Image: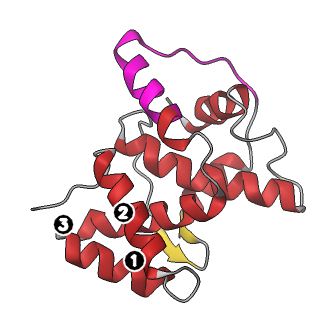
Amino acid sequence: MNVNEFITFLIDNRLITPNITTDDDEAFNNRLKIQKYVLIARRLGLIDKDYNYDIYIRGPYSSDLADEYYVYEPCKYNIPKEKEKAVDRFLSIVKDKDNNWLEIAGTALHINIRNKELENVEWLTIKAKGYKYPKEKIKEIIKELINYKLLDINN
């Protein structure tokens, strides 16, 4: 899936609203979710393009991805048969997850790209997000990501 198709998929599944480009809280939250959903979807093989992310105050952010969603146009998409399980898995992972969860999970996933040791991922995620979230909450979300098999950890 490309990002345009993925955004339409997110809207169809009520994970975001079509309000992406306005200057209000709803659009900001939608953009934040897109940034984190793409990280998760890429890990599951649903997104074709590999975006370069940097850590910002609300977690990983890709300016290249932002360039694409600011010109979003509704479109049709097709989920190939071989991707149906990954789509179901994606939906089960992100269902009922709030922005705080997405911010912590996105940060841990981003850190895990360069760090494969669990202790490093925990420590660096706590370092990045510990000022805002309790360490226990961060460790709990990292355990969820391990259970979802989203983190590539050497243990």
Q: Look at 46% across and 61% down and name the residue there.
A: 105
Query: Which circle's residue, 2 or 3, is located before the other in the chain?
Result: 3
**Residue 73 quadrant:** top right
Query: Which circle's residue, 2 or 1, is located before the other in the chain?
Result: 1
Name the main secondary structure of what is drawn in magenta: helix
Spatial CA distance of label 3 from label 1 is: 13 Å
Q: Look at 49% across and 16% down and name the residue there.
A: 79
The question of residue 83 being in magenta is answered with yes
The amino acid type, in three-letter code, at marker 3 is Lys
Which is more toward the observer, 78 or 133? 133
* Of marks 2 and 1, the one in the foreground: 2
Residue 154 lies, with reference to residue 77, above or below; the image says below
Which quadrant is the C terminus positioned in?
bottom left
* Residue of label 1: 125
Residue 100 lies, with reference to residue 50, above or below; the image says below
x and y percentages locating residue 28 in the rendered image:
78, 60
The amino acid type, in three-letter code, at marker 2 is Ile
Q: How many marks?
A: 3
The question of residue 26 being in magenta is answered with no
Question: From which residue to which does the magenta span run?
Answer: 74-91
x and y percentages locating residue 95 in the rendered image:
58, 39
- Residue found at the far top of this picture: 81
* Residue of label 2: 142
Secondary structure beneath dot 1 equals helix
The amino acid type, in three-letter code, at marker 1 is Thr
How packed mark 1 is, by other alpha carbons closer than 10 Å (few <14, some 14-19, many 20 or more), is many
Spatial CA distance of label 2 from label 1 is: 9 Å
Residue 24 lies, with reference to residue 57, above or below; the image says above
Q: How is the image coloured?
A: secondary structure
Q: Is 150 on the left-hand or right-hand side of 64? A: left
How packed mark 2 is, by other alpha carbons closer than 10 Å (few <14, some 14-19, many 20 or more), is many
* Residue of label 3: 116
